[in-house]
Image: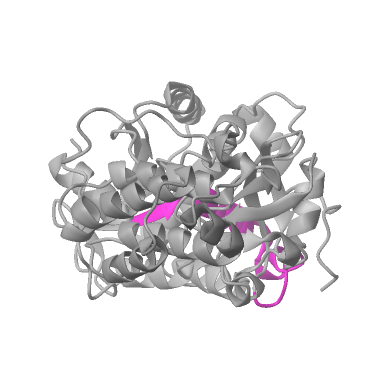
Amino acid sequence: MNSPTLDLPARLLGSRAEPAADLAGHLARHGALDVPRGHPGAWSRSVLEAVEAAGLRGRGGGGFPSARKWDTVRRASRRPLVVVNAMEGEPASAKDRVLLVHAPHLVLDGADVAAAAVGASEIVVCVADDRPAVATAVEVAVSERRRAGMSGPRITVQRPPGRYVTGEESALVGWLDRKLALPVFRPDKSRPLTVGRRPTLVHNAETLAQVALIARHGPEWFRRQGTPEAPGSTLVTVTGAVRSPGVLEVEFGVPVVDILRRAGVDAPLSAVLVGGYGGAWLDGAHLSTPYAPGPLAAAGVDLGVGVLVALADRSCGIAETARLSRYLAAESAGQCGPCVFGLPAIADDLERLAAGRADVGVLARIDRRAGEVVGRGACRHPDGAARLVRSALAVFGADARRHAEGRPCAGHTAPSVLTLPRPPDDRRGVR
């Protein structure tokens, strides 16, 4: 395997200068995909083995081995359901919507492969109700496949509410099952989620696009990019202090700084937010870290949902974290105490700290409260918020101490580099 580079051809998106691919363009580029129908026992085992040999992990944030998910669902006694999770509730992320607008048939191919492998007769594509262009692109692609006489499971598009927590897979399945998008505590993840008692395979849109490529080209081809521990390419949304924000396709192992340069870094950086708004800050001194799970974890961050937010050194990391903390507190599903009470209390303290109006015990109190919410929610939402806050206190430690002393940095009133949607008035019980 060669050293990771930014110069390898894009597998998922191709040339972004090209118009969005219709079915004819998709087939011209990728070729037809022969998916057996009926009871493809030998084929199912072979494609499951190919996905496992490729080392494919989910691209939605959890990084769970895809083949293991399939194996759990296919062993269930009832006929499964395949759900394409294209909710992308993370405000900084755009990779799934770009993928579904520019290459919807690649995602649908992957969903078709997964459905055949686990024995599902139906595919549901979930697109947030505030993403009409994405839903239209999928619906057009589904109609094209139907007119072309492509056989396979029935495909429908559902429009759950566009909320941060709705994209969490148990919340999404809850909405499909009961129209109530509340995460559930799952102590045993070897048992599949269910919709109407049907075992349900939930995959992120990018994950399924990768499945479609593995099914066509095999695991050895897939592993030609990336590293032995993190094979393949992935989509990254780059925003913040860059000239050309957007979605880039990179192979795992490329240094973070190279990805930022490709997006056009336009100022010295103090830090980069890695993984999304429930992610963590990476110190500007560590930008040479390879973009891959192992090296990032060693640096105190993780891939998350595939987001890099560049923070210029003229901005204030404490103020930006306070804004994020308030947003995450407002996005609670409202069913667990750590979110309902803990996250707003942390946000209150951070806002006072950012403004230089905090008391002397604020730093210890923020850290203590962040520790108290970890592992105590039905989902990982409070854990992500705590990880973000604790990383800010570490990376921006000197600034935090000056803010606590009533001497906030000049950047605390600078415009934010973050994308923060205005929350509705009622954030609880998402229906």
Residue 362 position by quadrant? bottom left
Query: At which x and y percent is residue 94?
Result: 55, 38
Direction from residue 333 to residue 348 in the image, left or right: right
User: What residue do we see at 26% from left, 47% from top?
Assistant: 332
Query: At which x and y percent is residue 37?
Result: 42, 52
Q: Which is more toward the observer, 213 or 351?
A: 351
Q: Eyeballing the image, is 114 above or below 2?
A: above
Q: Eyeballing the image, is 16 above or below 343?
A: above
User: What residue do we see at 65% from left, 35% from top?
Assistant: 26
User: What residue do we see at 39% from left, 46% from top?
Assistant: 352
Direction from residue 30 to residue 175 in the image, left or right: left
Quadrant in the picture for the N terminus: bottom right
Q: Which is more toward the observer, 116 or 205?
A: 205
Q: Eyeballing the image, is 223 above or below 205?
A: below
Q: Which is more toward the observer, 426 or 189?
A: 426
Direction from residue 429 to residue 235 in the image, left or right: right
Query: At which x and y percent is residue 31?
Result: 68, 43
Quadrant in the picture for the C terminus: top left
Whether 60 is among the magenta residues is no
Q: Is residue 125 visible?
A: yes
Whether 214 is among the magenta residues is yes
Direction from residue 371 to residue 104 in the image, left or right: right
Snapshot colouring: one colour
User: What residue do we see at 73% from left, 32% from top?
Assistant: 16
| Range shown magenta | 201-229
